[in-house]
Image (cartoon, rainbow, N blue to C red):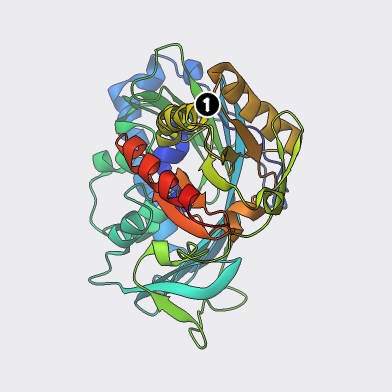
Amino acid sequence: MRQLTAALAAGVFLTGLATATVQDSPEPPAKAPVAAKGDPAAFTAADRSPESIKAGLAQLAKTRTAYRDAPAFTEAIVINVKSPMGEQKTMIDSQWGAKGAFDITVDGQMRMLAVGGDFYMLMPADDSRYLAEEIVDGDVLSIIAGATGGGGLPDPAIPFRLGKADVKPEDIPAMLGLGAMADPKLVGFRSGATGPQALLEGQGGKAVVSMNAKTGFVDRIDLMVTPPGAPPEFKIDVAFVIKNELMKALKSPIAFDTTGKTKVDSPDGLGPQPLEIGSMAPDFELKTLDGETVKLSSLRGQVVVLDFWATWCGPCKRGLPVLNQVVQWAAEADMPVKFFGVNVWEQGEAAAKLALAKGFWDPQNFSFSSLIDPDDSVVAEYGVTGIPTSFIIGRDGKVEVVHQGFDPSMVEAMKAELKAAVAEKG
């Protein structure tokens, strides 16, 4: 679960997925005209005047009030990320009811609810486990931030509807950085084709926020950012297309029934659970990046090392060369050990995933091959909750060692573990 929440947290989502590819998702049904893409160049000198800035802050305050005063509404957000390395699409669907109730689902993978003073988090694919926390003094924003590793979720309704009631207008732009810009300020305001538009600038980028003339809600946010540490020419464009439906009350009240479900203490307790040492490693049949088929059970009698990785995972890319040292050592010692990377959690169709993985892997010239888990079924069976994760599977097919995370000192530890595994009978 740590991987999921980190990937969906705003800061990581907007700055760490530059290597992603397009994921096809159905568009939500149209409920209102979509605001045209915001263009910073469209803001004239007059739009940037002190008078315009004052009017813009007043409009942002009205927009925030519109979110807070709405009796109920539903929201569908399609987030399109474009970078020099590819594209990604993510969807956030939510319902907002009375007395602070909400129900937010991100890409069908993560769900957060607030009902009757309690916050809940779960995975829709397996709602048998849930995280629960009491909302103290209405501070649900801190709970959301903690549940997502500090980044929160990239949805303007969250800070607008759930934040403190008393906020100065000049502090509202900071709610619209969505993890991509530090300390954004309002620098321009104009009337757009479908409603007012605000221009924000902050450390690392700029954004155009388009608001609906009738409802006051945000229709679209166009972000142009450069990730921290990236060269100035490396640009990421992020478009938030938002469709809201205001109503007097939700069709069904937001509720969550814990009957028959298991409460966990942290997000790591949600979703797949790691395999226990001594359990049988789930069999699989996967292809290498070059198209050769590998079936785990056919390797019985040999020790097998699996290292789960992804192209967007920095620790994975630092850990693979370290693992390669172990691979070379085992080959020189003529040890009966098979090593495989397993590419997982990429976005896009199968062909796009393969091209992405090969694009990273082949130039590395590693001394071992990588498999690809096209539907992420194998990584789920192995209960992996964060990557990199490595498994040492004994001659008898049972899990002997699990390494989680990147540790440069793992070379010597893994050498000793492999010597022990090889010495055991298959």
Tag 1 residue: 237
- The residue lying furthest to the bottom in this view is 259
On the image, the x and y values in percent for residue 324 come to 47, 28
Q: What residue type is labelled 1?
A: Asp
Q: Can residue 403 be seen in this view?
A: yes
Above/below status of 181 relative to 279: above
Q: Which of 140 and 421 lies nearest the eye of the viewer?
A: 421
Answer left or right for 115 relative to 228. right
Determine which quarter of the picture holds residue 213: top right
Above/below status of 49 relative to 120: above
**Dot 1, crowdedness within 10 Å: few (<14), some or many (≥20)?**
some
On the image, the x and y values in percent for residue 133 come to 33, 73
- Disc 1 secondary structure class: strand
Q: Which of 266 and 67 lies nearest the eye of the viewer?
A: 266
Answer left or right for 48 relative to 98. left
Answer left or right for 16 relative to 30. left
Residue occupying image coordinates x 43% and y 27%: 325
